[in-house]
Image: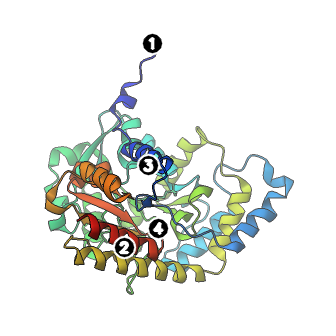
Amino acid sequence: MFKLSKKLQELPPYLFLEIDKAKRKARAQGRDIIDLGIGDPDQPTPKHIIEALNRAALEPANHRYALDQGMPLLRRAIEGWYRRRFKVKLDPDSEILPLIGSKEGIAHFPLAFLNPGDYSLVPDPCYPPYKGGTILAGGKPYIMPLLEKNAFLPDLKSIPLSARKKAKIIFVNYPNNPTSAIARDSFYKELISFAHKNKIIIISDLAYSEICYDGYKPKSLLEFKGAGDVAVEFHSLSKTYNMTGWRVGWACGNKKLISALAKVKSNVDSGIFSAVQLAAAAALNGPQEHLEHMCSLYRQRRDVLVRGLNSLGWLAFNPKATFYVWIKVPQGRDSIKFSGELLEKANIVVTPGVGFGKYGEGYIRMALTVDKDRIREALDRLRKYG
Ligand SMILES: *Cc1c(COP(=O)(O)O)cnc(C)c1O
């Protein structure tokens, strides 16, 4: 009787729900499942952040509607963190906007700039909200394939003039989910000049800026000359402070772009719970030691997993950042079928690459969010089942 809107019908099916269903069914059958599928930190939020939440939650003043633009105290904390981390100066009043998780802001941003039929330039494979947000805004995702031969960076030169003319936004995400690729300086410089030349807004998703290894430290796009005129960067406390469930992140960068996103948001939400904002400020202002510990934990797991897979003859890319390992499906098989077989035969959950877009076909993603012993157990099972 009720017909879904055209936009909703256009959205790609959310493959991850299917995987979740299969996983739950297997667990209900009492099988011992090793879940390498989800990108959700297994370590708890650092204690001083939880304590800040507890204190703030007891304060009645924090129970009321929060300000749409976020508390000044949080925006100042973000400003300080950004300056210390990237040596980039931001105006906390006009160039920073706290978000209910960065996914929220990323998905809403296209509403501010797309008219029906406009394009977003979207990498493929990618984090799904780039496509979803574009479609919900009435726009069309124009696919930029991320290919192994280009180190999983989009080939900007190959984007035809006709697409550049219709494009209002380009999404980039380095360190990258799902491929774990990183961006070279030369790529960011080329991207900024591409954006200026074609009058396209850059959305840089920097959710994994702090999850890095072997001495590599990701840069902010805003460190590069000319980025401040054309770019917004999205950050999240989710991966950096193990706060995925708390829902807090931010956008920062060009003030016209920030105020446009704020206008969209003022029509759809009423701010972030003040106690969560105060806890987020405590996270950004407080000790950062947990990061070293976390990255060392992920690195140890990475070493076990990548070495193990390579010794089985699989091709696994060794990540310098993010907590994902991107792996070629042996013999180039169908990634959904292959993931299904891993679940059925070895009780291992992985994410099929095609879930992130058609250029993810031929790959699977494993997350480093389970402990070393379970990773070793997973490798034993893979050895056993061939
Ligand atoms: C996890 C993740 C985010 C963070 O999302 P939140 O909504 O802040 O939890 C953003 N982008 C990518 C690519 C991610 O993997």
Closer to the eye: label 4 or 3: 3
Earlier-in-chain disc, 1 versus 4: 1
* Residue that appears at 70% across and 65% down: 279
Which residue corresponds to mark 1? Answer: 1
Percent from the top left, x then y, of residue 164? 22, 48
Q: Earlier in the sequence, mark 3 or mark 1?
A: 1
Position in image of residue 309 (x %, y %): 27, 73
Residue density around tag 2, few if under 14, some if 14–19, many if 20 or more, within 10 Å: some
Position of residue 72 in the picture relative to residue 112 (left or right): right
Name the quadrant of the C terminus.
bottom left
Label 4 C-beta lies within 8 Å of the nearest ligand 1 atom? no
Viewer-side label of 4, 2:
4
Can see residue 175? no
Q: Earlier in the sequence, mark 4 or mark 3?
A: 3
Q: Which mark is residue 212?
A: none
Disc 3 to disc 1, C-alpha distance: 35 Å
Q: In x, y percent, where is residue 82?
A: 53, 73
Neighbourhood count class around disc 3 (C-alpha, 10 Å): few under 14, some 14–19, many 20 upward: some
Could you tell which of marks 4 and 2 lies nearer the N-terminus? 2
What residue would you read off at disc 4? 369
In this picture the colour scheme is rainbow
Estimate the spatial distance between the alpha carbons at disc 1 and disc 4, rounded to whole Å. Answer: 43 Å
Three-letter amino acid code of the residue under disc 4? Thr
- The numbered disc on residue 224 is 2
Relative height, residue 308 to residue 197 (above, below): below
Which one is in front in this view, the residue at disc 3 or the one at disc 1? 3
